[in-house]
Each structure stands twice: as structure tokens, then as C-alpha cells.
Image (cartoon, rainbow, N blue to C red):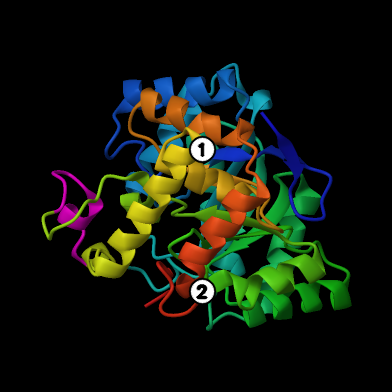
Amino acid sequence: MQYRRLGGSGLKVSALGLGTNSFGKRADFEASRRILHCAIDNGINFIDTANIYAGTESEKIIGQALEGKRHDVVLATKAGLVKGGGPNERGSSRYHLQAELENSLKRLRTDYVDLYQIHTFDPETPLEETLRALDDMVRSGKVRYIGASNYCAWELMKAVGISDRLGLNRFVSTQTSYSLADRTPENELVPMCLDQGVGIIPYFPLAGGILSGKYGGGDKAPPGSRAQTDPNFARFVNDRSIALGESVRKLAEGVGCSPGVLSLSWLMHQPAVSTVIVGATRAEQLEENLNSASLTLKDGTLEALDAVSRPFRSGEPFAVYRLP
């Protein structure tokens, strides 16, 4: 397994990270435990969750399954998206973040979180309030590093500027949708992160399965696929994206790997990317994707992937989660 610095910090994270959105939802406790232990046994140390995943079940499962292994991982969670119906059960106010951190620590059965991330930008809370609250968490020892998620480039730059001006701990990372099927971060976010030393953590690296080879020609979606279960996702499954998936599949055949492994490896070769989080509902899926961390792509393959995916630098981002 390769390990890289998380942004400009000294923290080392595995090139492939584990996303746990499926824990407690599409993967029960035993399946989730096997996936988590498979990840750790194979050198993955970055485990990403959130306070709202599977209605808090993801954090609970991780807390139980990590017993005896807590110090083997860099544990990351998030808060900021809608948690409940109350007026203060969302956003990144000091009130909400402090309450959610304490609840996450209890569910995760730990005294500290290695990376605490703001799940999305909150236009109703002053950034200074959010950043001072996060700085207090770091100084208290309950949080070691802080990160953002779903921030526009200007929002992230404003936050970093405020932290620098006030002498506060600054964001070391940001999560964003980024893949061969969504290269929109390269227009503004990637240059900003390279300039400011912020690590990028791509989510949806396989574009919901489009880059895994599961979608072929025709309009029929595979049983159980995201296009079949999520109407919002179905709009991305079109002739253009299916053609991209087919191009990636052909290039993967030439390399001697699966389309998913090739797509993950491409992301790992991109500047500013610190770790790529990939989910799984079975340990076997994760075992296959582990091959991406040891795959070295030749210049010709990188150039070919750049060519077939270049049109996806423009258009609508694959996913953006914002407060309603």
C-alpha cells in the first residue's frame, strides 16, 4: 500500500481509503466488519464515515468493529448536513458541531477523531464561527485535523484565508466528487488546492458504477444498480457516459486490469489527490479494488484516459451535497 501526506499536513494516509456509507444500510454488521478488517489487513488506514450515514448506524458499526484496532486507522467523520427536523440540527454553527462531535465520539467509541470534516458549506453561519469552533476542538484533543467537503473553490479559499489571518488551524483536506466521469474539480478546485496545500479526497470515484463496467448499451440498468434505485442518479446514465465507460473498459483490457481498478488508479495519479475513498458491500469488492494502489500507469495510458474523459471537465458536477 502507498501512503501519502494528507494535504500539507504530516499525516500519512493510504492511497486507497474506505468509504462506509453502505455500513448499516446495504451491508449488515457482519459484512461491514469483514470489509473493515479486510481493509486494515491490507494496509488501508483511512476510514471515512459521517454522522448521518445509515441514520448513525455506520458510526455505531465502526465503533464496535474497530475494538482493539482503533490505533491502526486514521478515522474521519463529518457533520453539517441535515441531521433532524430542529432549527439547530444542521449546518456548521458551534452549537451544532459541538453536539454532533460528542455524539459521534460516543458512537465511534473513541476519545478523538483524526479528521473532522464539515459536510457542506453553511451560508447561514459565519465562517469565523465555524473555524473557531473547529480550532477549539483541535486544541481540546478531541480532533486532530480538520477538513471540508462539498465546498466550492472560493468558499474553501475564503475559509483558508480566514484561518491564516486569525492564526487558526486550517483545513488540510476537502472531499469532492471527482472521477473520469466528473473532472469539473480540475477547473478551479484542483489549482486552488495545489496552491494552498489542501489534499483532495475524491468520492464517487467510479461514478456510481459507470466506470466499473456494469453499464452496457441500451436503456436497461443492471438489477440493484444505483441507476435503478436512485432516480437522481439515473440522469447521468446516458449515451455519453456509457460511451466513456466502454472506452475505459477497452483501455483496461490493454492494461490487464478491471475498468474500476484503472479508474481508481487514474485518480491516484492526479495532482493534489491524497486518498481515494471507495465503498463496498462485500469484502471481495474491496479486495479487487486494492489492486489500484499497486498499479503504475504508463504515460500513454494516462494520455488516453485524459483524451476520452476530457469532455467531462465541463458540464454539471456528478454530485454536490448542499444544505436545502
**C-alpha distance separating marks 2 and 1:** 24 Å
The answer to whether residue 267 is seen in the rendering is no
Question: What quarter of the picture does the C terminus occupy?
Answer: bottom left
x and y percentages locating residue 64 in the rendered image: 46, 24
Residue drawn at x 28%, y 40% as measured from the top left: 25
Q: Where is 180 relative to 298, above or below?
A: below
Of the pair 158 and 261, the residue shown nearer to us? 261
Q: Quick one: SS at disc 2?
A: helix
Q: Where is 39 relative to 128, above or below?
A: above
Q: Residue 252 lies in magenta, yes or no?
A: no
Magenta segment range? Answer: 221-231
- Drawn side of residue 9 relative to residue 57, left or right: right
Question: What quarter of the picture does the N terminus occupy?
Answer: top right
- Drawn side of residue 170 relative to residue 126, left or right: right
Amino acid at circle 1: Val
Residue drawn at x 38%, y 51% as measured from the top left: 211
**Residue where numbered disc 1 is placed:** 255
**Residue where numbered disc 2 is placed:** 313
Amino acid at circle 2: Arg
Q: Quick one: SS at disc 1?
A: helix
